[in-house]
Amino acid sequence: MELSESTLERLKLLKEKYAAIGQDLDSYLDGLIFANPLAYWDYIEVDALLSLQKPKTDFPDEKIFIVYHQITELYFYLIQHELDQICRNGKIISDIGQDLGWNKELKADFFIERLKRCNMYFNALTRSFDIMRLGMEKEQFTKFRMSLLSASGFQTASYRKIEISCTDLKYLVHENKRKQLWDADIHEQLDNIYWREGAIVEETGEKTLTLRDFEEKYLDEFHDFADVYQPMNLWKKYKSLSDVDQANTELIKELRELDVNVNINWPLVHYRTAVHYLATKGESKGTGGTNWQKYLPPRFQRRIFYPELWSEKEMEEWGKRWVEEVFAETINTEEKLKDKL
């Protein structure tokens, strides 16, 4: 059978590709001849994926809790994948080390498209969070959560890396120290990042076990990550664009939406869920001893990635309406429960 011109051209390209890394094309072709056809369940690793749920109790709803958090981590993984492409100007390195593309000058269209994907992933997460708020029986949750101490969603390293990738660390310093550390070294700023205050025992000022474990595992990694990503975070990439591109209304819209998604919508769907499960039970601490009432509401710390893109009034009212709506909903729910009783 005679090979077509297009097939011969592809073989030529493959030979050049493998020669560039010192590999022999014929050996790879032999591998294709002997390889079995790929099946969906093998490619997606379905069996492995469905074996990763290991509840600590016999309450059925604990499995919902685990699966949804695993889904969340996968979405965070996708978000960081898109952020990496912006931070690295579209540079893509294959698993075999081949450089597959490099946009030496970051283009606004590329920036916008990746931001849209990030916002799409965050929107999917926030819209689906009612699975956590309404998809479990409150009685089951308040019991199985006691077996999870001191583990907490507070300990998600992937979300912290998203924050570090998105903006200058000075915007993530706890508000009480932000002015003081505005021009400090990034590592000093990281050591005073806002979320560390969310797992401090208020009565003693000591770190909770949740925070101690989290820092022991990830703090050095965060410092290394900051060394790489702070010089090329999203804000710096935006400011490196031409004046015309910086004025692009669609780019500004997507950056603002990302700011809201990370710093208002995502913390507040957690806050809303904490109110549902904890506040109505008279509890003030979250899993791991986190102080969710002060840690989650954006109005207490006003974490804003891109303050130059917001008006003074918008920043002053950052997240305020969202929280007021949650409180109003909670009060209405409690009143309805009292009426039924």
Image: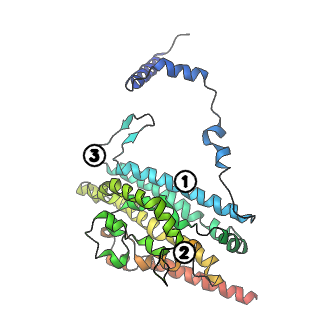
Q: Amino acid at mark 1?
A: Leu
Q: Secondary structure at mark 2?
A: helix
Name the residue at 67% across, 55% down. Answer: 53
Q: Which of the 4 quarters of the picture holds residue 143?
A: bottom right
Q: Are marks 2 and 1 in contact (CB under 8 Å)?
A: no
The span from disc 2 to disc 1 (Cα, nearest Å) is: 21 Å
Which residue is label 2 attached to? 271
x, y percentage for residue 86? 37, 51
Which residue is label 1 attached to? 74
Q: Quadrant of the N terminus?
A: top right
Between residues 105 and 195, which one lies in front from this camera angle? Answer: 195
- Residue 105 in the figure: left or right of residue 44: left
Label located before the other in sequence (1 or 3): 1
Q: Are there few (<14), some (14-19), or many (20+) residues within 10 Å of tag 2?
A: many
Q: Is residue 179 visible?
A: yes
Name the residue at 36% across, 38% down. Answer: 101
Q: Is residue 306 visible?
A: no
Q: Quadrant of the C terminus?
A: bottom right
Label located before the other in sequence (3 or 2): 3
Q: Which of the 4 quarters of the picture holds residue 190?
A: bottom left
x, y percentage for residue 103? 32, 42
Q: Are there few (<14), some (14-19), or many (20+) residues within 10 Å of tag 1?
A: few
Residue 223 versus residue 96 in the image, above or below: below
The span from disc 1 to disc 3 (Cα, nearest Å) is: 30 Å
In this rendering, the label closer to the viewer, 1 or 3: 1
Which residue is label 3 attached to? 105
The span from disc 3 to disc 2 (Cα, nearest Å) is: 40 Å
Name the residue at 55% across, 59% down. Answer: 124
Label located before the other in sequence (2 or 1): 1
Q: Secondary structure at mark 3?
A: loop
Q: Secondary structure at mark 1?
A: helix
Residue 27 versus residue 140 in the image, above or below: above
